[in-house]
């Protein structure tokens, strides 16, 4: 710690939030199964993802945890994804079987959205082999519609996915990241110590293209990967975030690639994309090398009205914290304090959110190494690593307060997935994270500084029903804030869809502007904080108390 | 006549400064040369190397894409690679453009032309392959890739590798050039150090020698001046003594004789002249007394006959009468024993000190103390004194200088204190 950092730390106010580990109390009992039996297959290191979703539409967030399974011919134990229903009293019940999700599948990630606009969130599960599209029946269960939707007969090594309406036709399309060309038969021997097999880095394998599926609006999808210009067989993609970096109202994509240049796809508004990452300054690290991009999120962390980017990377590579500066992005990690603090950690899931509801987006990143054999290396990185919670001071500096928000939170973990959602409906965002080969954790956020929030739950009519891609702008005494309604971001995970704004101690906000995906703009003056507003496209908002 | 060393010293300083300036100029020039080499060659080379590596990476990506096209499993048509190949070409063209700019003027024109034509041929072949992918069966496309594109790509990869090797060689040469400049600077630094030390030693020796000569000369001049001053004082005393004796002996006896003659004449002269003779005799008598007084003042006979103590006690009332300044005198218990040739100097210092007090102090009283064994004379007044800085820039007073010279003749010291009045103290160690 430099003298300047020490002084800043001493001068910084005490964070008034606690992240209380309520996993056990909530009744969540999950253990990630990698299927590892000694062969050290590459997919074992990557999962799992997680999601906050309201699958039964009761207004209370439920929890979905993705899981792996045994490798063929190597039975170890029964495992599968788990769905926990929110009992509205701080506890959850395992409803996996009742929801029809107790099937065998080597899962890695999940993307949640209402692809058929029926008002119930559906699931797209990614993993090794055939991914699954699960339609929500609206009666507390899901049915597998992969084949019927035209997404069958397609195997891959899929990681993160995002639902978004790239052609603005009101139907959510699907972008799926694929990692490398891998199969047990094509597994490569790698070793850290020259004797025993270790997990390979992706350099050992060839890349593979991501997929873009256009929602035809009739329950089926068309593969437009090649047609849209997104086809790229060199990519080794792990994370994806939707954003609109050129602010033309058409959704763009940022794809985090592992040891390959990141991709920034600009939407050409005609069904095609143009790759701009090198030109925009986000393809490589400052030294010109491609970093090991894992998770990614986009957010207006400077309150400039433009979305910046956070990308987690390998240890010794630092988090990339990109700010839009007019002609492109600049990595501000070093000067904001995020770089030095994240230099020694290997990050996966990362999300911007206003942890202390002070009106500035903070940054949460979970960490953990990919290979447990690093423990055998002298002076090597740790396998389990503590997460980072970077508190934004609103003046361009971030301070890691993970040691100050509860002892359990700071404990080292082999972190992977990360999702945010207000499961207890108290107005702040709680944290759900998963660990590789270990448990999932649910942290209840208790903001104790009297700070308030305002939340917007959007429902599209002409636009897609989930309003994914819509922008909510709030003007308060400190100026404007913006959030995008999104799926995806982070790593293998899916967060609460509604947009939550911290407003400090303010009881009212001056003005709210809703920019819907199809271009419509709704504007409302003077809304009281401390509530969720259900906003239907073209209609006046309806306030719902948090509890 | 001793020549002033200032000119030679100034010349030494000038030469030293010139050498320092010359060396500073040389060093700055060397740094500039190094910077030029560094920015002009090394940095350019590194930037060019980065671009060549980028080109290699793009060629490698192209090779992998071509391999993937041949290995494709039917999931996507070969035409799907069009966008990926377009991105590679865009990046490659940009890298080529930047690299060409960096290598401008350093690359063999033939080599540059070959590179350019090779890339043009490659892209022509890629475009042809892309159109084949749209129109012809995959087997024909893969055959074209294997037979035409891959050999061209290999040739370009080899050419790029050679350019990188050339680049590295140039960078190595630049490194050697920089090492040469460093060596030259190091050698010249030693030469400069040697010359500087030599010059410093020469200037120092010259200064030491000049100082020694100057000090010797000053000491000699000081001694000469002192001898001269003492001779002057001795001559002055001798003259005063001779005049005093002449006044006392010659004029005194003449006037005494004139007085006796006038007495005799008065007894035999007519009554009409008696009064005039008596008046004349009184005038002669007054003149005789004045001559005797003047003789005493010039060279008190009492000093020779009765010693210093008596002379002081005689002189102080005279001073009081002449100036109206009261003198508080504290004399010694026993009269100082001092031979007259030395006592006259103590007496003259007393006279000068009292005269100074009368002229400058503006007081009504002075104090005189005389002690014996060791001899100590102190004359003090309560006047305003005089600031030593008031004397700065002025020639020292002849009186003061004379007092100091006389003290030096006595082998004693004269101390003058001038704060809160003036105190002049003569101390002569025990003989």
Image (cartoon, rainbow, N blue to C red):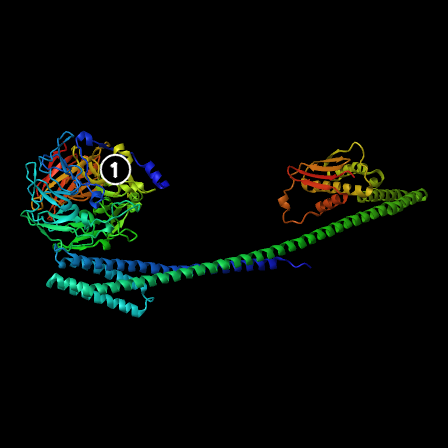
Chain letter of disc 1 in the image = A
Residue A234 in sight in this render: yes
Using the image, determine if residue B27 lies above or below residue A3.
below
In the image, residue A162 lies at what x, y percent? Answer: 15, 46
Using the image, determine if residue B23 lies above or below residue A504.
below
In the image, residue A73 lies at what x, y percent? Answer: 16, 42
Residue B126 in sight in this render: no
In the image, residue A532 lies at what x, y percent? Answer: 14, 36
Please state if B195 lies on the left or on the right of B106 as rendered.
right
Q: Which of B417/A171 is in front?
A: A171
Instruction: Determine the residue located farthest toward the bottom in the rendered image.
Output: B110
Instruction: Determine the residue located farthest toward the front in the rendered image.
Output: A73
Q: Which of A420/B370 is in front?
A: A420
Q: Quadrant of the N terminus of chain B?
A: bottom right
Please tell me which residue is depicted at 79% across the width and 48% down the height of the picture. Answer: B234
Question: What SS does tag 1 mark?
Answer: loop
Q: How many marks?
A: 1
Badge 1: few (under 14), some or many (20 or more) residues near its Cα, within 10 Å? many
Q: Which residue is mark 1?
A: A413
Using the image, determine if residue B93 lies above or below residue B362.
below
Q: Which of A297/B73 is in front?
A: B73
């Amino acid at each position: 710690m430099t003298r300047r950092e020490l002084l800043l730390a001493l001068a910084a106010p005490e964070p008034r939030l606690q992240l209380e580990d309520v996993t056990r109390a909530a009744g969540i009992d999950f253990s990630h199964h990698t299927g590892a039996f000694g062969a050290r297959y590459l997919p074992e290191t990557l999962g799992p993802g997680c999601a906050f979703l309201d699958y039964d539409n009761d207004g209370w967030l439920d929890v979905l945890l993705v899981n792996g399974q045994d490798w063929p011919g190597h039975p170890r134990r029964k495992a599968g994804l788990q769905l926990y229903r929110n009992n509205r009293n701080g506890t959850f019940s395992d409803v996996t079987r009742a929801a029809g999700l107790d099937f065998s599948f080597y899962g890695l990630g999940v993307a949640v959205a209402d692809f058929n606009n029926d008002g119930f969130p559906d699931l797209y599960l990614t993993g090794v082999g055939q991914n699954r599209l699960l339609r929500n029946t609206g009666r507390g269960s899901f049915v597998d519609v992969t084949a019927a939707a035209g997404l069958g007969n397609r195997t891959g090594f899929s990681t993160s996915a995002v639902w978004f309406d790239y052609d603005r036709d009101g139907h959510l399309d699907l972008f799926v990241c694929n990692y490398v060309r891998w199969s047990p038969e094509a597994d490569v021997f790698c070793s850290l110590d020259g004797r025993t097999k270790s997990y390979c880095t992706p350099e050992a394998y060839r890349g593979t293209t991501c997929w873009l599926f256009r929602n035809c609006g009739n329950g089926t999808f068309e593969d437009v990967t090649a047609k849209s210009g997104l086809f790229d067989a060199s990519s080794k993609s792990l994370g994806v975030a939707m954003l609109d970096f050129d602010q033309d109202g058409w959704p763009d994509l940022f794809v985090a690639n592992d040891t390959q240049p990141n991709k920034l796809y600009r939407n050409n508004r005609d069904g095609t994309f143009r790759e701009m990452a090198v030109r925009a300054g986000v393809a490589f690290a400052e030294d010109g090398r491609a970093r090991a991009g894992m998770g990614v999120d986009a957010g207006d962390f400077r309150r400039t009205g433009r979305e910046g980017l956070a990308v987690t990377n390998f240890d010794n590579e630092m988090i990339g914290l990109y700010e839009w500066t007019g002609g492109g992005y600049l990595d501000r990690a070093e000067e904001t304090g995020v770089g030095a603090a994240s230099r020694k950690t290997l990050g996966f899931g990362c999300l911007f959110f206003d942890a202390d509801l002070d009106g500035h987006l903070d940054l949460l990143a979970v960490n953990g190494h990919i290979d447990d054999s690093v423990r055998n290396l002298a002076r090597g990185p740790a396998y389990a690593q503590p997460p980072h919670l970077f508190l934004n001071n609103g003046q361009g500096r971030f301070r890691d307060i993970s040691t100050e928000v509860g002892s359990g939170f700071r404990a080292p973990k082999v972190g992977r997935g990360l999702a945010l959602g207000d499961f207890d409906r108290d107005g702040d965002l709680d944290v759900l994270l998963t660990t590789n080969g270990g448990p999932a954790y649910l942290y209840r956020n208790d903001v104790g500084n009297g700070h308030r929030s305002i939340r917007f739950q959007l429902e599209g009519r002409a636009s897609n029903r989930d309003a994914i891609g819509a922008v909510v702008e709030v003007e308060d005494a400190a100026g404007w804030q913006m959030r995008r309604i999104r799926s995806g971001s982070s790593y293998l995970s899916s967060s609460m869809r509604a947009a939550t704004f911290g407003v400090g101690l303010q009881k009212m906000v001056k003005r709210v502007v809703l920019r819907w995906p199809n271009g419509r703009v709704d504007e409302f003056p003077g809304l009281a904080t401390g509530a969720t507003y259900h906003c239907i496209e073209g209609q006046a908002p309806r306030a719902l108390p948090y509890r | 006549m001793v020549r002033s060393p200032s000119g030679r010293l100034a010349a030494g300083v000038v030469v030293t400064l010139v050498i320092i300036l010359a060396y500073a100029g040389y060093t700055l020039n060397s740094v500039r040369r190094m910077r030029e080499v560094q920015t002009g060659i090394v940095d350019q080379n590194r930037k060019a190397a980065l671009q060549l590596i980028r080109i290699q990476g793009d060629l490698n990506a192209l090779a992998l894409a071509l391999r993937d096209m041949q290995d494709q499993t039917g999931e996507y048509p070969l035409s799907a690679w069009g966008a990926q190949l377009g991105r590679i070409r865009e990046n490659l063209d940009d890298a080529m453009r930047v690299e060409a700019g960096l290598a401008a003027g350093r690359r063999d024109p033939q080599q540059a032309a070959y590179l350019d034509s090779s890339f043009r041929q490659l892209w022509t072949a890629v475009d042809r392959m892309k159109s084949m992918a749209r129109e012809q069966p995959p087997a024909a496309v893969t055959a074209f890739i294997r037979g035409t594109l891959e050999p061209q790509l290999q040739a370009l990869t080899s050419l790029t590798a050679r350019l990188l090797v050339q680049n590295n060689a140039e960078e190595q040469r630049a490194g050697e050039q920089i090492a040469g400049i460093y060596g030259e600077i190091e050698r010249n630094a030693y030469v400069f150090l040697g010359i500087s030390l030599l010059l410093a030693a020469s200037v120092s020796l010259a200064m030491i020698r000049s100082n020694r000569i100057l000090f010797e000369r000053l000491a000699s001049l000081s001694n000469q001046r002192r001898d001269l001053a003492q001779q002057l004082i001795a001559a002055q005393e001798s003259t005063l003594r001779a005049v005093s004796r002449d006044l006392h002996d010659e004029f005194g006896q003449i006037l005494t004789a004139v007085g006796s003659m006038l007495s005799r004449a008065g007894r035999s002269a007519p009554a009409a002249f008696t009064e005039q003779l008596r008046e004349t005799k009184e005038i002669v008598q007054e003149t005789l007394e004045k001559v005797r007084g003047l003789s005493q003042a010039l060279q008190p006979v009492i000093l020779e006959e009765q010693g210093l103590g008596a002379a002081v006690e005689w002189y102080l009332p005279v001073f009081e009468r002449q100036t109206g300044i009261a003198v508080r005198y504290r004399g010694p218990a026993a009269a100082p024993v001092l031979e007259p040739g030395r006592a006259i100097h103590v007496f003259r210092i007393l006279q000068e000190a009292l005269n100074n007090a009368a002229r400058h102090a503006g007081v009504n009283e002075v104090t005189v103390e005389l002690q014996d064994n060791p001899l100590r004379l102190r004359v003090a007044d309560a006047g305003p004194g005089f600031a030593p800085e008031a004397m700065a820039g002025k020639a020292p007073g002849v009186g003061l200088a004379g007092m100091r010279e006389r003290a030096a003749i006595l082998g004693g010291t004269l101390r003058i204190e001038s704060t809160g009045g003036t105190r002049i103290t003569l101390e002569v160690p025990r003989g």
